[in-house]
Image (tube, rainbow, N blue to C red):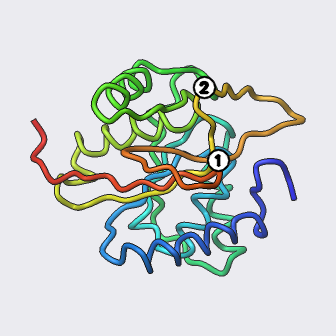
Amino acid sequence: MPLGGSSPTGARGYLACAAELEEQAPDLAHVVTAVGSGGTMAGLVAGLGAERVLGVDTGAVDDPVERVTALVEALGGSVGALRLRSDQVGAGYGALTAAGEHAIRTAASTEGLVLEPTYTAKAMAGLVAAVADGDVRPGSGPSGCTPGACPGSSATRSPSRPPGGPDAPRMRPDPGSELVFRVVADTPSR
């Protein structure tokens, strides 16, 4: 298993996650996830379909579309048109962006959430941008999941330790290392 879990075997875990999301939240419209090495998004796309998964590129790899596409196909899924935002990368992987910093401050002050800069802040900033540009409509009830990026952890790019894992909005901690969240977007945007 490669670091980051981005292999068909690792992505299969998020195929199972997609099934759990369908069972627990059958009305979900969107799953928002940060994209590091691509395995999380690939498993979710294979299980839910590309139209329901919004990936937010963190800048961890040079070819996120190709990586996600290859993993989805290896899982036997159909890719369709991937929804992958690349507008939150900023200076690159591990670099905090102004939008990410705003997401961290807003999530902390309004929801009491602690986001970290590499994955969850970029995913939340991507969700905010998706609402602002109409890709996610208020009231559509987006939902999502993120694998355990620890609050306050810092990720660095290293050939011996590639990135892996995702991110996001209004979250409720699970007892394990994973966070599951449901974004409530039922108020009109201002």
Q: Residue at x 59, y 21 (%)?
A: 95
- Residue 108: give x, y in percent of width and height: 37, 28
Tell whether 51 sits left or right of 95: left
- Residue 188: give x, y in percent of width and height: 9, 46
**Residue 37 in the image: above or below residue 52:** above
**Location of residue 155 by image quarter:** top right
The quadrant of the rendering that contains the N terminus is: bottom right
**Residue 171 in the image: above or below residue 45:** above
Tell whether 181 sits left or right of 166: left
Q: Which residue is at the front of the view, 133 or 14? A: 14
Crowd around label 2: few <14 · some 14–19 · many ≥20 (10 Å): few
Numbered label tally: 2
Element type where label 1 sits in the image: loop
Q: Which residue is mark 2?
A: 152
Tag 1: amino acid:
Gly
Q: Residue at x 20, y 54 (%)?
A: 137
Tell whether 40 sits left or right of 164: left
**Location of residue 79 by image quarter:** bottom right
Q: Which residue is mark 1?
A: 165
Q: Which residue is at the front of the view, 86 or 118? A: 118
- Residue 36: give x, y in percent of width and height: 64, 44
Element type where label 2 sits in the image: loop
Q: Residue at x 56, y 37 (%)?
A: 119
